[in-house]
Image (cartoon, rainbow, N blue to C red):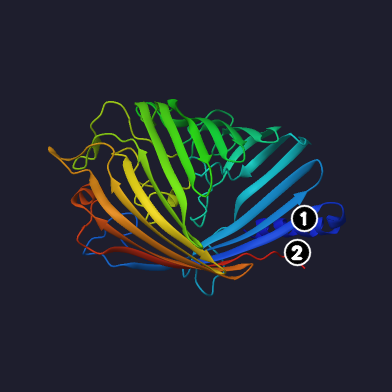
Amino acid sequence: MKKLFRLFLVLFLGLVPSLVMAQLTFTGEIRPRTEYRHGLKSLFNSSDDAAFATSQRTRLNLGYAEERFRVGLSVQDIRTWGDVKQLNLSDKNQLMLHEAWGEIIFNENFSLKVGRQELVYDDSRILGNVGWAQQARSHDLALLKFKTDEKGKFHVGFAVNNDAEFLSRQLYTTNYKSMQFAWYNRKSDKFDFSLLFMNVGQERDADSSEAIDRDTRYSQTFGTHMNYRPGKISFTGSLYAQTGKDPSDTDLSAYMFNLGMKFPVADNWKGNVGIEMLSGTDYDATSKTRLDEDYKSFTPLFGTNHKFNGHMDYFYVGNHVGNVGLTDIYGGLNHSKGQWSFATAIHVFSTAADLYLGPEKQDKYLGTEVDLSVGYKYSKSVLIKAGYSHMFASDSMEALKGGDKDETQNWGWVMLVFKPNFLKK
């Protein structure tokens, strides 16, 4: 950690004299968040006690740009308050690289960006940086960026992952083994659309009886995201499909769609309604097994999934993968005036496929979640945010998730966000 920090400091001090020749940015973020958890991600049991803890992200961002190239470096420390002794000689939390990339600018329409970097596309449903999570997400890859014309962009990304440098091929299961994607986006005054194709290869030990028997299973995700703004009302829509093989080498055939509308309600008030459906596979919660021969469950692979399907993270945030899917009918109100903002949302959840508890088929309705949040902009660099969420779960949710639906299922949080610009005069 010390060596990495020294490297960061040397790079910064070395670049400062060149300010007159190039553009240098140096920003930071300190983000402590305190949470009360009594039913977050899964239903709480009456025998459990609520959790109360504070996590913190501390991040330094350095950027440097010239006419022919750009570089970006982001280092961060992620910790929970109290996980290190006060009189500590060493820190178990490691300063880690979140981003470290360089971009060659061949001309105004073509560039190549390589290294560890965030991928944020469209509404972040398929590719996002997972900014809510303190650690966030970034990828190691090469990214070709084309500007097709004044209104169009085309990106192509390539990644191949390994645990280390070896003299022969080794089994890799840390992340995906390989990934390639192509994304095209076109904007106009009233209508925007994007097309995405992504091929992901996951490596698994195909035969555990043999010492080394690697097999890479490839899945393809493809679809479109659209925005239409005819006036004060705007519409969004997404449609994606998945084919290929799942990690267990089962045939994959899945899809998802989202339709949404935003509209003004009154001065400084906006409303939204919509429906999202992610296909699922018939599932027996007793044996925890899929009942369909094919894998029909859509997975939003690298998306910012906390942004969707309620803030309590019951679905697709490290969970709810490979089972009954989800139908989410949602609506909400947002208010913003001056330094204050307020948002409320309601989600009605049900299964997309059939859920069984042994031989008994369960009702599709899973529950209703209510989310409330408030924000206050104390200054240009300081934000104060807080929120409360409550889940009203059904018997089917208990069958699927476990826990006790009759227990109070709630979650609250308070977060301070400091974002200094160290070079701003």
Q: In the rendering, which numbered label is found on residue 423? A: 2
Q: Is residue 156 above or below residue 13?
A: above
Q: Which residue is mark 1?
A: 24
Q: Position of residue 87 (x, y in %)?
A: 54, 75
Side of 64 relative to 128 (left or right): right
- For badge 1, the amino acid type reads Leu
Asked if marks 2 and 1 touch (Cβ < 8 Å), the reply is yes
Quadrant hosting residue 388: bottom left
**CA separation in Å, label 2 and label 1:** 8 Å
Residue 102 percent coordinates (x, y): 71, 43
Quadrant of the snapshot with the N terminus = bottom right
Residue located at (34% from left, 59% from top): 370
Q: Dot 2, how many residues are within 10 Å of its Cα: few (below 14), some (14-19), or many (20+)?
A: few
Q: In this rendering, does residue 299 appear at all?
A: no
Residue 204's disc is none
- Identity, as a three-letter code, of the amino acid under mark 2: Leu
**Outermost residue to the right:** 20
The percent coordinates of residue 24 (x first, y second) are: 77, 55
Picture coordinates of residue 49 (x, y %)?
28, 67
Residue at the far left: name it.
359
- Judged from the image, the secondary structure of the residue bearing numbered disc 2 is loop
Q: Residues within 10 Å of mark 1 (few under 14, many from 20)?
A: some
Quadrant where the C terminus is found in the figure? bottom right
Q: Is residue 1 above or below residue 105?
A: below
Q: Earlier in the sequence, mark 2 or mark 1?
A: 1
Any part of residue 345 in sight: yes
All told, the count of numbered labels is 2
In this rendered view, identify the residue nearer to me: 212 or 178: 178
